[in-house]
Amino acid sequence: MDIKNAQVVVDNWIKEHGVRYFNELTNMAQLTEEVGEVARIIARRYGEQSEKESDKEKDLGEELADVLFVVLCLANQTGVDLQSTFNKRMDKKAKRDHDRHHNNEKLK
């Protein structure tokens, strides 16, 4: 599924199950909460913090999907075409960063 279709899927879900979008500020808070859950898993599973027994069953993929869902909600309700914007951003990054990363001694 491409990003454009994902935005449509989320919009349809909101209309069918969610009644309406939460307002932008609420969704921003939701996004922050979801990113925090991703951070907790990464810090404990891959970082130096010990993982609590209750965190061991948390699924990183599911938490990342929650982040994506809220990002898609925010894009929909603010009129952002993420597919187009993402494509432009990737083109810009490819041009700007190609030599930079290839010449970075830390990455060799």
Image (tube, rainbow, N blue to C red):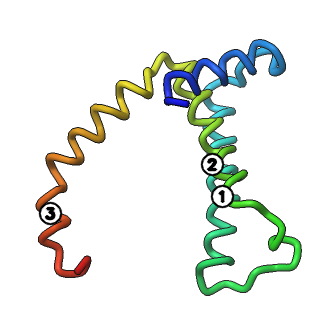
Q: CA distance from mark 3 to mark 2?
A: 31 Å
For residue 46, side relative to residue 78 (left or right): right
Q: Earlier in the sequence, mark 3 or mark 1?
A: 1
Amino acid type shown at disc 3: Arg
CB-based contact (under 8 Å), mark 3 and mark 1 = no
User: Neighbour class for label 2 at 10 Å: few (<14), some, many (≥20)?
Assistant: some
Relative height, residue 81 to residue 55 (above, below): above
For residue 77, side relative to residue 21 (left or right): left
Q: Nearer the viewer, residue 10 or 33?
A: 10
Q: Which residue is mark 2?
A: 32
Give the residue displayed 69% in from the left and 33% down from the top. 26
Amino acid type shown at disc 2: Thr
CB-based contact (under 8 Å), mark 1 and mark 2 = yes
Pair 3/2: label in front:
3
Residue 2 place in picture, x, y as percent: 50, 29
Q: Which residue is mark 3?
A: 100
> How many numbered marks, from 0 up?
3
Q: Which residue is mark 1?
A: 36
Location of the C terminus by quadrant is bottom left
For residue 44, side relative to residue 68 (left or right): right
User: Neighbour class for label 1 at 10 Å: few (<14), some, many (≥20)?
Assistant: some
